[in-house]
Image (cartoon, helix red, strand yellow):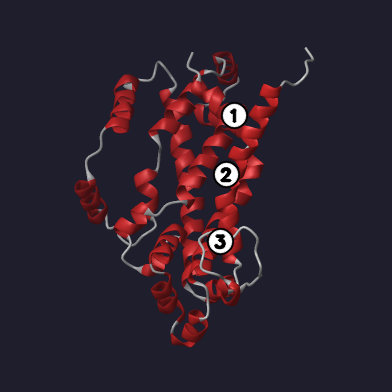
């Protein structure tokens, strides 16, 4: 039914636009600060209208060696980590979605238990150390090989698929591996795409395990590099670029270096979002409803 907008509708629209503006302003501030000209910067915390445009912060960061290694490490952790995440999650969910599987109830109880309890930080660290994973990509990938929440979402999604499809495939001689990769996964593409993106964001934002298990700065991912940059930008830049860049560094706006680091860190994952965002609502909703 068509109806005219009331003053209440307009008030709600204005309020939502104000909320959107408040959400966008911090990112806008980060962006224009990263391009700030040190000579034109005044002492204030927020710059609404930029008065200059300078790429010196990005130039200094990209000339250093740390950020290149950090980007490479984050890419490796993200690509390999998401591959491991999806293989373990899809295969585990497919097996646990079968009500007739022996030991299924015991395994599901273990999954639920893992969501509620952990062994503690010190036993966790000793386990990683005994496995000789210190200063390796495995320390950032294997401890988070599967998310129990996403595993349960995937189980519910696989249960929603009509069993007649699998029965007809088995009558034609298909085995479980063929059914999973040729029938179940294509049907579950929205849920899998949404979970893949969630995993990718989590792996790209990885810094905690790197902080615990990485003593070699060459193994730092991008998020840990950003953390150290925000804590002490001058020391980080001097250690990275050496004495030859000290003079240029002293003429650079420190907050500009910090904000440029934030932009470089956010850019890759932000470019992925638009392509998979359409799967969010459908994917999570399909897998979240239990029969």
Marked residue nearer the N-terminal end (1 or 3)? 3
Q: Which mark is residue 264?
A: 3
Residue 145 against residue 232 in the figure, above or below: above
Q: How many marks?
A: 3
Secondary structure of the residue carrying tag 3 is helix
Q: Can residue 136 be seen here?
A: yes
Work out how far the residue at label 1 is from the one at label 3, CA to CA, in angstroms. 28 Å
Residue where numbered disc 2 is placed: 22
Marked residue nearer the N-terminal end (2 or 1)? 2
Q: Which mark is residue 281?
A: 1
Q: Position of residue 24 (x, y in %)?
A: 60, 47
Work out how far the residue at label 2 is from the one at label 1, CA to CA, in angstroms. 24 Å
Q: Nearer the viewer, residue 79 or 268?
A: 268
Badge 2: residue crowd in 10 Å (few <14, some 14–19, many ≥20): few
Q: Nearer the viewer, residue 111 or 257?
A: 257
Residue depicted at 57% across the width and 52% down the height: 27
Q: Position of residue 62 (x, y in %)?
A: 55, 72
Horizontal side, residue 86 vs residue 137: left or right: right
């Amino acid at each position: 039914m068509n109806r005219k907008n009331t003053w209440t509708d307009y008030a709600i629209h204005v309020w939502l636009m104000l909320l959107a503006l408040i959400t966008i302003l911090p990112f806008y501030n980060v962006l224009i600060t990263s391009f700030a000209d040190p000579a034109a910067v005044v002492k204030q915390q927020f710059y609404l209208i930029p008065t200059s445009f300078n790429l010196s912060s990005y130039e200094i960061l990209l000339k250093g060696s740390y950020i290149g290694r950090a980007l490479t490490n984050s890419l490796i952790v993200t690509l390999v980590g998401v591959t491991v995440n999806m293989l373990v999650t899809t295969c585990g969910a497919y097996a646990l979605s079968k009500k007739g599987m022996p030991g299924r109830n015991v395994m599901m109880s273990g999954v639920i238990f893992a969501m509620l309890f952990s062994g503690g930080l010190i036993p966790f660290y000793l386990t990683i150390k005994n496995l000789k994973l210190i200063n390796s990509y495995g320390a950032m990938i294997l401890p988070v090989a599967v998310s129990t929440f996403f595993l349960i979402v995937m189980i519910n999604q696989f249960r929603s698929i009509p069993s007649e499809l699998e029965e007809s495939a088995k009558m034609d001689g298909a085995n479980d591996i063929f059914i999973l990769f040729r029938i179940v996964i294509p049907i579950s593409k929205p849920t899998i795409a949404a979970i893949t993106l969630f995993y990718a964001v989590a792996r790209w934002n990885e810094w905690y395990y790197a902080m615990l298990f990485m003593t070699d700065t060459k193994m730092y991912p991008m998020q840990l590099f950003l953390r150290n940059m925000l804590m002490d930008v001058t020391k980080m830049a001097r250690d990275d670029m050496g004495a030859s860049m000290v003079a240029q560094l002293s003429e650079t706006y420190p907050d500009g270096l910090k904000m440029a680091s934030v932009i470089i860190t956010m850019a890759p994952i932000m470019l992925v979002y638009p392509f998979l965002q359409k799967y969010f609502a459908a994917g999570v909703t399909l897998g979240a409803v239990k029969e």
